[in-house]
Image: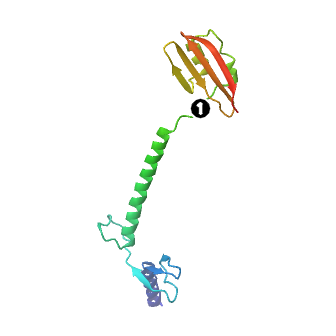
Amino acid sequence: MRFALLLLLLASASAAAQVYRWVDKSGTVNYSNEPPPAGAKASELPIDARPGPPSAQPQDCYSVRCQGERMEDRLARRDAADAQAQAERAAVTPPRPRGLEFRRYISIQRGMSEGEMLAIAGPPDLAFRDFTSHTYTYLAIPGEPFITTITVITGRVSEIERVRKF
């Protein structure tokens, strides 16, 4: 009885270490640790499931362990490339417009200093500086569908224009 149990355990241990590769009728390559269906021409792949250092097979890679290590390397390189591409896209993407809320807009008056106006309105979405004037533009956003343009001449607000865009 013990001999039969031992024989069964050894047979199951050796069967679990086998990996089969076969091509089905539609041309799909299949891998499985169970025997392929009847009539399929299968090949057994050597599997190295022991813990240890990475395999040192640079060119020929036939074991599942070696192929898994290569796949992990490819995935790591792909993740690094994706992260770099995302960082590059973020660097060239312009910042989202902030707009100018109505309660801040009504606090701005002609004759107000440029510093006061910027303290109330905040940094503009677009700024144009000329020799004598500065033009600050606050773009429309979904919550505030107005474009606000404030012109400052010699350090004082001289013109405020607010136009509805959508």
* Residue drawn at (62%, 8%) of the image: 111
Q: Position of residue 2 (x, y in %)?
A: 46, 88
Residue farthest front in this picture: 131
Q: Quadrant of residue 142?
A: top right
The three-letter amino acid code for the residue at tag 1 is: Pro
Q: Residue drawn 48% across and 80% down?
A: 23
Q: Is residue 107 above or below residue 19?
A: above
Residue in view at x 41 percent, y 81 percent: 44
Q: Is residue 72 left or right of residue 94?
A: left
Picture coordinates of residue 107, whole percent (x, y): 67, 16
Q: Is residue 104 shown to the viewer in this render?
A: no
| In-image side of 92 versus 96 (left or right) | left
**Frontmost residue, 9 versus 92:** 92
Considering only vertical position in the picture, is 17 above or below 118? below
Q: Is residue 83 left or right of residue 140?
A: left
**The one of 97 and 10 positioned closer to us in this rendering:** 97
Q: Which residue is mark 1?
A: 97
Q: Secondary structure at mark 1?
A: loop
Front in this rendered view, residue 125 or 121:
125
